[in-house]
Image (cartoon, rainbow, N blue to C red):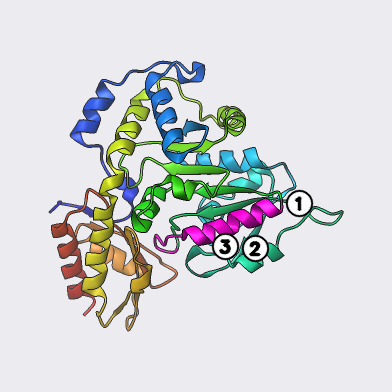
Amino acid sequence: MHEVIDLRSDTVTKPTNEMRAIIANAKVGDDVYKDDESVNELESYAARIMNKEKALFVPSGTMGNQICVKTHTNPAEEIILHSKSHIFVYEAGAVALISNVLTKTVDGPNGVMDINKVKENIQQGDLHHAKTTLICIENTHNVAGGMVLGLDYMDKIYKTAKENSIKVHLDGARIFNAAAALNVDVKEIAKYSDSIMFCLSKGLGAPVGSIICANEEFINKAMKIRKMLGGAMRQAGILASAGLHALKTMPPMLYEDHEKALLFADALYSHKNINIDRKTVQTNMVNITLKNTELNGYDVSKILQAKNILVNGEQASNRLRFVFHRDVDEDDIRKTIKVLNEELN
């Protein structure tokens, strides 16, 4: 059991000793000149496993998403995305500032936009309307508690886009969790997108960085936008070497994080003061809703914090999110369950 149990996010993972040794011995160069061997190897490997032509290493997932939106669009065009998508909710309105595009949000349960509503909201760009040029999807879906979009659904979105000459961007921050849940090769998810961003710094456990994958023309344009946004780095192999190690070693282990989430959810499923929608526990996240109590999510998070358990709780609602990762073990989970049972009975 760890002294502090951190369940706020899978971004809190620490580099392993092996990863630290790899960082210390990384082959580096100036990546702006494309001289960094570690970055080059990472990008080549990432493109290959996603079955895309090229890849680009970027500092963060948010920057990766924003680069992709800007690369795909022109000012005064419109993008379609889920009303609870990370790009719309958690990226500080960047699509408006950086890309100058309109957002048309579509609702749907568990991060799944109603395909008919997507079709209804596509604009062809007549005199009165902005033209729809991009659809953004998210797999797994963060706000939905790590829910997975199925391949059939992604295929429908992709076909709808192609029928209307629209591009598709996949926010695949946790795409390897989705692949583990669906038991498919990750390229089977990536093929339903024109561009994809995935994070190295979440469940894969690298300290920093994300990857964009797309065709060569797209990546060449994206590289210039990365420069505009200050994302071009010099001896970035220090970071890329850790990312490559994570990418080669961690995906097969992600099912363990999913099992931890199930252990936690099953233990609290029948609790009289906690509601868990069991069907939404598909990957490494569990959303719980408090009931029969005046406490909100933030109140409970502070109670847990006093017991050295860190979790995100919402002040405006009775919801909390628990995220499981490689730096959480079964003893940590059992302690968290015990504390919740004691404090919420």
Vertical relation: 85 (above or below) 249:
below
Q: Nearer the viewer, residue 62 or 315?
A: 62
- What's the mark number on residue 271? none
Identify residue for label 3.
83
The verdict on residue 163 being magenta is: yes
The mark nearer the N terminus, 1 or 3, is 3
- Do callouts 3 and 2 mark residues in contact (Cβ within 8 Å)? no
Vertical relation: 160 (above or below) 272:
above
Q: Nearer the viewer, mark 3 or mark 2?
A: 2
Residue 239 left/right relative to 67: left
> Helix, strand or loop at disc 1?
loop
Q: Nearer the viewer, residue 15 or 249?
A: 249
Mark 1 nearby-residue class (10 Å; few <14, some 14–19, many ≥20) = many
- What's the mark number on residue 131? 1
Mark 3 nearby-residue class (10 Å; few <14, some 14–19, many ≥20) = some
The mark nearer the N terminus, 3 or 2, is 3
Q: Residue 236: which quarter of the image? A: top left
- Measured in 3D between alpha carbons, the distance from the residue under mark 1 to the one under mark 3, in whole angstroms, is 19 Å
> What residue type is disc 2 on?
Val
- Measured in 3D between alpha carbons, the distance from the residue under mark 3 to the one under mark 2, in whole angstroms, is 12 Å
Q: Residue 225: which quarter of the image? A: top right
**Residue 98 shows in the view:** no
Q: Position of residue 81 (x, y in %)?
A: 59, 57
- What's the mark number on residue 118? 2
Q: On the rendered image, what quadrant is the N terminus found in?
A: bottom left
Q: Position of residue 84 (x, y in %)?
A: 53, 61
The mark nearer the N terminus, 1 or 2, is 2
- The region drawn magenta spans 144-164
> What residue type is disc 3 on?
Ser
Residue at 80% over, 56% down: 129
Q: Nearer the viewer, mark 1 or mark 3?
A: 1
Q: Nearer the viewer, residue 175 or 317?
A: 175
